[in-house]
Amino acid sequence: MESHLSRKKLIVIGGGFAGLNLIQSLKRAPLDILLIDKRNHHLFQPLLYQVATATLSPRDICVAFRELCAKQQNTTVIMGEVVQIDKEERKVILGNGDSFDYDYLAIAVGSKHSYFGNDKWEAFAPGIKTITDALKIREHILTSFEKAERLDSLTETHKYLTFVIVGGGPTGVEFAGTIAELINKTMHKNFRRIRTERARVFLVEAFDRLLPPFDPKLSERTKLDLEKLGVTVLTNHAVTDITAEGVRLGETFIESKNVIWAAGNAIPAVVKTLGVEQDRQGRVLVEKDLSIPDHPEIFVLGDASHLKSKKGVPLPGVATVAVQQGRFLGALIKEELSKKHPPKHRHHGFKYFDKGSLATIGTGKAVCTIGKFNFTGLFAWFIWAFVHIAYLTSFRNRLSVTIEWTLHHLTGARSSRIIHSTIDEKLPKRETW
Ligand SMILES: Cc1cc2nc3c(=O)[nH]c(=O)nc-3n(C[C@H](O)[C@H](O)[C@H](O)COP(=O)(O)OP(=O)(O)OC[C@H]3O[C@@H](n4cnc5c(N)ncnc54)[C@H](O)[C@@H]3O)c2cc1C
C-alpha cells in the first residue's frame, strides 16, 4: 500500500459547483485533497433570488463543506481566503500569511459582479452572488414595504414601491417575475394601507431583447409573460447613473429606493496573481485539458476559466459547465495517478455536453431550450423545477425546497420574512393609523 508521505497533494480553491464535483469524483482516489474556501458552505446560486425574495431560507440552498466532506477520508477542509498563488514554488498563500504546497492545483473561484467600472453604484444597487448579498436584498425589500406602510404621502410611498432590476439575463428575469408575484400575491393580502397595485417593477436591459443567449422567440415570450405579471420591460436602455434616489437611463430617471444589479461578471482578484493571459472579464485562457500554459499541474475551471466551445465562443458561465469540468478534471487526475497510457483526458481535452437552457418567469411559467426544441409555460416550468431539485446538493435541501414550493404555490405565503434590523431612518410623520 502507498504511504501517505508519497501521496500526491491536490489543493482545490473554491468549493462551488466545479470544486465540489472535482472533489466528489476523487472520493476513493489515492491522493490527499485540501479544499480551501473563504466560506464554510457550498451555495446553490441558481436559487439565491428565492432567498432574496423570501420564498426560501439560506439553509435550503446551502450545505456546510464539513458536512459534505465528512465521509470523504482523503479530504481536509480549511476556511480561508487565498490571496496569492506562487506557481514556481507551487504554493498557495492565504490572507493571514499561511501557505500550503501542492502537486496539483485546481482554481475554481467562480465569479463576482462587475459594475463596468462604476463601482460607486454598488452602494445603491447591490448584486447577488452570496448568501450575505441575498439576505441584504431581502432585508431591503421587506423594509421598503414596511416604510411605505408608515407613509402618508403618495410621492414618498412611490419610491419605496418601485423596484428596478438591471440586467435582462436569467437572474434579472427571475428576480423581476418573483418581485411582481411577491407584490401581487403576498404583500397585497398582508398590508392594510399601501396600495400594492401602485407598485412598479422595471426590468432594464441594454441589449435589444431579454435572455440574449436564448432563441429570440423565447425572449419575446418571456417579455409577454413578464408584462402580464405587471413588469415594465425596458430593452435597448443602458443605465447611465445610479444614486440613492434611483436610476438614470439617459434622459429618463426612475425614482426608486430598490435597485438590484443583475448584470456583468468579473473574476476574483487572486486569479491575477497567476500571471497568465486573461480575457476582458478576467477569465483565464486555459488549454483544452483546463491547465494553464507551461504548467500542466495547475488547472482553472468553472466560471473563472475561458475555453472555447465548438462554435468558437467561450463556454457560458453556468453551473452545468462547472459541474462537467469538475468531473472531467477528477477523471483526468485519476487517470494520471493510475499511470494509464495513453492519457485519454489530457489528449482529448474537455468537451461540453450542452443539456439546454432554462429560465423561470414566475409560478408555472418558464422558458426552456433542449437541443432544437423550445418549450414554454407550465411544461417548461416543470422541467425547470425538476432540474433545480435534482441538482440541489443534499437530500435534506431537496425535501425542504419541495415542501416550501408546494406551500408557496398553494397559499402564496412566503415563510422567510424575518427583518433583522429596525427602522431608524426619520420618516415623514403619519397623520392617522
Ligand atoms: C444569482 C445567480 C443565478 C444563477 N442561476 C443559474 C442557473 O439558473 N443555471 C445555471 O446553470 N447557472 C446559474 N448561475 C451560474 C452558476 O451558479 C455558476 O456558473 C456556477 O456557480 C459556477 O461554479 P464555480 O464552481 O465556477 O464557482 P462558484 O459556484 O461561484 O464557487 C466559487 C467558490 O470559490 C470560493 N472562493 C472565491 N474566491 C476565493 C478565494 N480567493 N479563496 C478561497 N475561496 C474562494 C467561493 O466562496 C465559492 O464557494 C447563477 C449564478 C448566480 C449568481
Image (spheres, grey):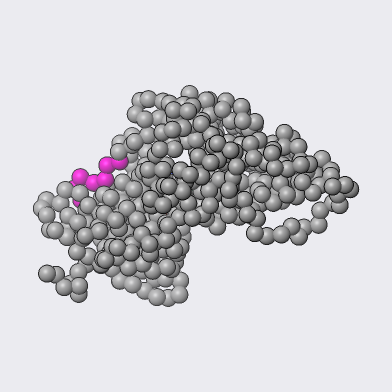
Answer with the quarter of the image where residue 356 lies: top left
Please report the residue visible at 46 percent of the width from the left and 51 percent of the height from the top.
61
Q: How many numbered tags mark residues here?
A: 0
Is residue 5 positioned above or below 355 on the image? below
Q: Position of residue 229 (x, y in %)?
A: 61, 30
The residue shown at (41%, 43%) is: 389
The foreground one among 97 and 218 is 218
Residue drawn 44% across the image and 33% down it: 382
Residue 273 appears in the rendering: no
Front-lying residue, 81 or 308: 81
Quarter of the picture containing the N terminus is bottom left
User: In screen coordinates, is 413 left or right of 3?
Assistant: right
Residue at figure coordinates x 17%, y 57% from the top left: 336
Q: Does the magenta stretch include residue 351?
A: yes
- Picture coordinates of residue 214 (x, y %)? 45, 31
Instruction: Give the magenta part as a residue range.
Output: 346-352
Q: Position of residue 241 (x, y in %)?
A: 67, 45
Note whether residue 2 is visible: yes
Q: Does the magenta stretch include residue 141?
A: no
